[in-house]
Amino acid sequence: PPPPPKPVINSCATYFFPAIWVGKLPRKTFKEKARRSLVFPRKALSLKYKDRVVVVNQDGLIAIGEESIPKATRMLNEIMATFLLMGIKASAIRELEMCEAKIDASSLALTQWGTRTHTLRTQLFDWFPSMQQMFEYRIEIKKEKLIRVIKQAARISRDPDISDFLTFFLQAHTHLKNSEYSQSFIMSWVIVERQMYWLWNKFLREEQISSKRIKKLTFPAIWSIDFVLEALNLGGQLSKGECDGLMSLKNKRNDIIHHGEGTAYEEAEKCF
C-alpha cells in the first residue's frame, strides 16, 4: 500500500511588504549574474503565535496555521503593526492578498501556497522573475530581530483594545502612504477618540468617582467627544492648546464624514 500522506497544518500565507530578506542578502558573482542564476529561498524560522505555528521563509513569505483568512489577516496585521511601531517599514495586509497554504507538521516547513489576486505584495509570489530583480530593494532583517518583534506582537496584542489599536494604526499608516488621505484621517481619528475616552475613564477612576456616577458621566448619548475634550481640559488632563488642536481635528473629521470634504496630505499626516 502507498505510504500515508504526511500530516499538514492548513494555513494562510502572504508576504511582508515592503519586501524583506531574513539575514544577509545573497551576493551573486558576475558569472552568476550573467547566467541569471536563481536563488531559491529557504525556511528562515518557525515559532508559535497565539498557539498557531508561524513560518517565515528567507524571502519574507510568512504563513500562519489558521485556516480562516479573516482571522489570519487580523493576526498577521498585528505583527505588521508591531514592526511599524519598532521603526521597520510595513503595510497592512488585505484579505485578498492572503492565500491558502500548507505547513508540514513534522518539519514545520511551507510545502504549498498560491496567490488570489495581483497586487504589489502578491507580485512577490511570482518569485522566479520578480525576486531576482528585487534583491536590491529588499530590507535586510536579522532573524533574531524578526523573532523578537513577533513575540512582542503576541504579548502586547493579548489586550483586545491594544489589538484594535494596532489594526487601526497600521491601516492609517498604509492609507497615508497610498495617498488615501481621507481614509487615513478617519482611521487615525478613531485611535485619538478612543484614547480620549480611555483618558476620561482613567481620570474618573483616579478621582474615586462612584460607579453610578461614572456610568452617568460616560453615557455616550450625552458625553460626546466634544464634552469629553472640554472636561479633560477643565480637569487638567489636557492643556488649552492640546484641547484646541484636538477640537480642530474633530471638526475636520465631521467635515469629511458629514459633508464629504477631501483631505490634504498635511491634514492626514497631522492626525496620524
Image: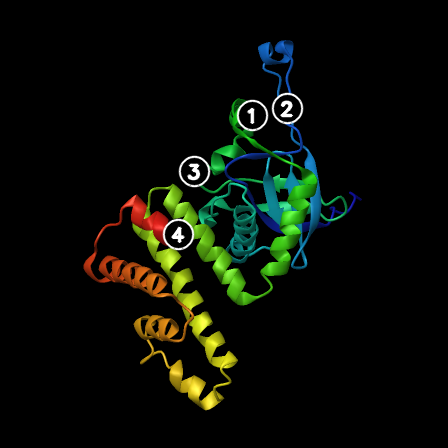
107 or 74, nearer to the observer: 74
Marked residue nearer the N-terminal end (3 or 1): 3
- Badge 1 local density, few (<14 within 10 Å), some, or many (20+)? some
Mark 3 vs mark 4: give the one in front: 4
Q: Secondary structure at mark 2?
A: loop
Q: Quadrant of residue 271?
A: bottom left
269 or 82, nearer to the observer: 269
Q: Secondary structure at mark 1?
A: helix
Q: Mark 1 belongs to which amino acid?
A: Phe
246 or 216, nearer to the observer: 246
Cα distance, mark 3 to mark 4?
A: 25 Å
**Which label belongs to residue 119?**
3
Q: Is residue 99 visible?
A: no
Q: Mark 4 belongs to which amino acid?
A: Phe
Cα distance, mark 2 to mark 1?
A: 10 Å
- The residue labelled by disc 1 is 135
Question: Percent position (x, y) of residue 183?
Answer: 33, 52
- The residue labelled by disc 2 is 39
Q: Mark 3 belongs to which amino acid?
A: Thr
Marked residue nearer the N-terminal end (2 or 1): 2
Question: Percent position (x, y) of residue 96?
Answer: 45, 47
x 22%, y 59%: residue: 255
